[in-house]
Image: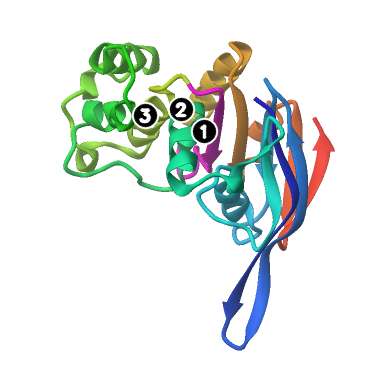
Amino acid sequence: MRLEAQHLTKSYRRGQTHFNAVYNACFSLADGAFVSLIGRSGSGKTTLLNMAIGLLSPDSGEILVDGNNLFSLEDRQRSDFRNEKIGYIPQGRSLLGNLTALNNTRLPFHLQRRSGDSLQKARELFIQLGISHLENSYPKELSGGELRRVALARALINSPELILADEPTSDLDIDTAREIWELFSRLNAQGVSFLVATHDVELSRRGNAIWQMHSGRLTLEAG
């Protein structure tokens, strides 16, 4: 799956003035790529990611998926597309507090009709991520690193072609952060594409390209 952005712009009002959260951003994410998106807080990384997967409509510009304009789809069609093709790990705590870790992971599987056993697949992911002992735990009982692993399992439950992650290692100790990035690298070697927003410059260099956001403007660099 090839993801392209053409001249994306998104503006917001702050007091009496407008500011560009993202301005004229263009990129092409090839199938199998691993791209790190770096930049300070407030530089526009989250806004760019949310537009890239159709959660946020741009003021101008297009997102193309295999040449097709994502925003030409109806809301339900975009939701179905994300559920089927994309795994998203948002910034911060995103799990539902009234569901166990296992059921949080299984939830996206049941948003569309599909064959297979979500329970078996979720448990296989928990084994892979080393969190089998957390199946029946609730989010409030989990550490930051454990929450990130469950969120990753949830992002993987539908075998996505692309994973977008927004600061997936923020507030984690260095060893746990490295474990997450090593897992990303293994999945990338299996053919999953990645676009990962991060502050961690050292870890970001594990990708094959680095893109930088500064005051809403995107700069592309080779890795």
| Nearest to N terminus: mark 1 or mark 3 | 3
Left or right, residue 75 beside residue 63:
left
Q: Nearer the viewer, residue 102 or 63?
A: 63
Q: CA distance from mark 1 to mark 3?
A: 23 Å
Q: Which residues are magenta?
A: 160-172
Q: Judge whether 90 appears above or below 67 on screen.
A: below
Q: Residues within 10 Å of mark 3 (few under 14, many from 20)?
A: many
Look at the image and tell me whether residue 198 can be seen. no
Please name the residue shown 24% across and 39% down the image: 139
Which residue matches tag 1? Answer: 174
| Nearest to N terminus: mark 1 or mark 2 | 2
The amino acid sitting under disc 3 is Arg
Label 1 or label 3, whichever lies nearer to me, is: 3
Which residue matches tag 2? Answer: 84
Label 2 or label 3, whichever lies nearer to me, is: 2
The amino acid sitting under disc 1 is Ile
Q: Residues within 10 Å of mark 2 (few under 14, many from 20)?
A: some
Magenta stretch, main secondary structure class: loop
Picture quadrant of residue 29: top right
Q: Could you say which disc has been placed on residue 32 in the image?
A: none
Q: CA distance from mark 1 to mark 2?
A: 32 Å
Q: Judge whether 135 appears above or below 9 on screen.
A: above
Which residue matches tag 3? Answer: 154
Circle 2 sits in a helix, a strand or a loop, which is it?
Answer: helix
Circle 1 sits in a helix, a strand or a loop, which is it?
Answer: helix
Please name the residue shown 58% across and 20% down the image: 192
**Quarter of the image containing the N terminus?**
top right
Colour pattern: rainbow
Q: CA distance from mark 2 to mark 3?
A: 13 Å
Q: Judge whether 96 appears above or below 33 on screen.
A: below
Circle 3 sits in a helix, a strand or a loop, which is it?
Answer: helix
